[in-house]
Image (cartoon, rainbow, N blue to C red):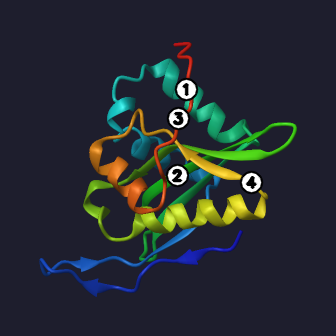
Amino acid sequence: MARQRGAEPVEADDGSIQTPFEIRPFEPRDSEEVIALLATIAANRQFTDDQWRDVRIRLRELPMVEVFVAQTCQAPALIIGCVALSVVRGLTEGRGFINDMAVLPSYRRQGVGAKLLEAVMRRAGQLNLSSLMVNTHRANDQARAFYAACGFSLEEILRLKIR
């Protein structure tokens, strides 16, 4: 998948400069920066060392999970956001599932999340998936509002919690 550029630098209302970034597929060398981003998600803050070890393994070994990162264009590049797309294939259709999306706090509200979501939506189209779902159970109110603004709607899915 080709890299996709984010916005050009612009001055925000508060006088700060928004950093240009690009969206690209995860590479193994990104692991620790992605782990640090995932640790900013409130639901992940209580993870044990064993749980983080499992995340590291899944980042490297799961072919049905695709991760995209947002990376600044300046040198040295900094990973400022990430999203994971899990693909679930049934007999009659495939669905995409977004469970982990994070953006560094200082880069929020600059279009990073929207560009990450665009990359996932484009990939879902390439994979001919019938729908995208997002786990908002673990999300905060801002994240829920973001997904709603991007066109996600609340629909009934029955869930059985195993652990």
Mark 2 residue crowding within 10 angstroms, few (<14) / some (14–19) / many (20+): many
Q: The residue under label 4 is which amino acid type?
A: Leu
Circle nearer the viewer, 2 or 1: 2
Circle nearer the viewer, 1 or 3: 3
Q: How far apart are labels 2 and 3 at the CA level?
A: 23 Å
Direction from residue 133 to residue 48 in the image, left or right? left
Q: Position of residue 83 (x, y in %)?
A: 52, 52
Q: How far apart are labels 3 and 4 at the CA level?
A: 19 Å
To which residue does mark 4 refer? 129
To which residue does mark 1 refer? 53
SS at circle 3: loop
Q: Position of residue 67 (x, y in %)?
A: 61, 51
Circle nearer the viewer, 3 or 4: 3
- Which numbered marker is on residue 161? none
Circle nearer the viewer, 4 or 1: 4
Residue 28 seen by the camera: no
To which residue does mark 3 refer? 156
Counting residues from the start of the chain, the first of labels 3 and 4 encountered is 4
SS at circle 4: loop
User: What is the count of numbered marks?
Assistant: 4
Q: Quadrant of residue 65 in the image?
A: top right
Mark 3 residue crowding within 10 angstroms, few (<14) / some (14–19) / many (20+): few
- Residues at circles 2 and 1 in contact by the CB criterion of under 8 Å: no
Q: The residue under label 3 is which amino acid type?
A: Glu
* 6 vs 158: above or below: below
Instruction: Name the residue located 87 percent from the left edge and 37 percent from the top edge.
Output: 91
Counting residues from the start of the chain, the first of labels 2 and 4 encountered is 2
To which residue does mark 2 refer? 83
Q: How far apart are labels 2 and 1 at the CA level?
A: 19 Å
Residue at the limit of the structure toward the front, as seen here: 156
